[in-house]
Amino acid sequence: MSGPITKVGYIGLGTMGAGIAGNLVKAGLAVTVWNRTPAKSAGLAARGAAVAGSLEELGRSGCEAIFLNLSDGPAVHEVLLGPGGLAAHLARGTVVIDNSTIGPQEAQQIAAELRGRGIEFLDAPVSGGQAGAAQGTLSIMVGGDEAVFLRGLPLFQAIGKSITHLGPVGMGQACKACNQVAVGCNLLGVCEAAALAKKLGVDPAKLVEVLGGGGAASQQLKNYGAKIFAGDLKPGFAVKLMLKDLGIAQRAADEVALPLEGAALAEKYLRAVAEAGGAELGTQAMSRALEERGKFRFSG
């Protein structure tokens, strides 16, 4: 296949996938979607997307590129290469673009199996949360053949603001693991700073303003500082997903004998929240772990 890609598929219409697929529709591409729960396709259908009734139907629809946004590596492998999987129905030269967050080695193994069928693969995890997915301002980290990346670049420009080709397959996922370590540790710092401010009686609004104007400024502070003090734990990115991502990062670090003690503490706090029933809450619910340890409440 050559020339610009105009017909794409999207699999996985969760918190992130629905927003990304919506921006592909908005860009004027012919988009066909498939989701295990068909009802999640309704909103995109109303905006002009076609809805496939099965993976086989999607695979035979003539899409030149297929995006995925699934929960983990096994789910990606099953949808692509499991019994009745998509790959059996794709034309040679189709580009599979995986927006899921999985392990670098998992991405490499999947790419190798697809390559044997003449199918191209880019691992392209994203950062920016639900808001970035909806607004088309995601940061996209891409691993794969450079020529394939350049062919897919107009698609990435429809859904993201920062797009970086990092090298061969797996490097996108490696960069995402680094991203999640930085996010987790930064969120830990925001939560601990907020807890200290609460205990010392610092005005929450003024604290967020002051920290946001200096060296402590960050996306985590901007997105979650005020929400932590208000007890607003609605998910932009769920605790359970961050735990999965930090687990990927820890396994990658173990493979190169690198201890990540800050990330381990962030993971410990998030796991405590999940075990207390907060797995579906937003990651700012890490603040609950500080409440338990400090015997206080941010709000109420």
Image: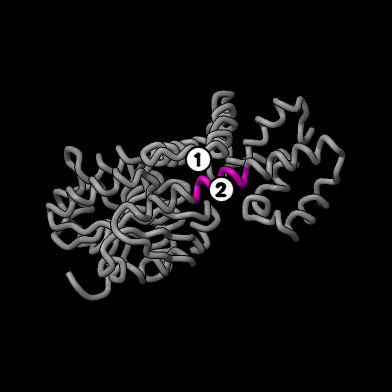
Q: Is residue 41 visible?
A: no
Q: Which residue is mark 1?
A: 242
Residue at x-position 40% and y-position 36%: 254
Q: Residue 245: x, y in percent? A: 45, 41
Mark 1 to mark 2: distance in Å?
9 Å
> Does residue 181 appear left or right of residue 51 in this picture?
right
> Does residue 236 appear left or right of residue 198 in this picture?
left
- Near-viewer residue (71 or 125): 125
Farthest residue toward the front?
257
Q: Is residue 267 magenta?
A: no
Mark 2 surroundings within 10 Å by alpha-carbon count, few (fewer than 14), some (14 through 19), many (20 or more): many
Q: Residue 225: x, y in percent? A: 70, 48
Residue at x-position 44% and y-position 51%: 176
> Does residue 214 appear left or right of residue 241 in this picture?
right
Residue at x-position 25% and y-position 56%: 121
> Circle 2 — which element?
helix
Q: Which residue is mark 2?
A: 183
Tell me, yes or no, whether the two marked residues, 1 and 2, touch with CB atoms within 8 Å: yes
On screen, residue 2 above or below 203: below
Residue at x-position 59% and y-position 24%: 276
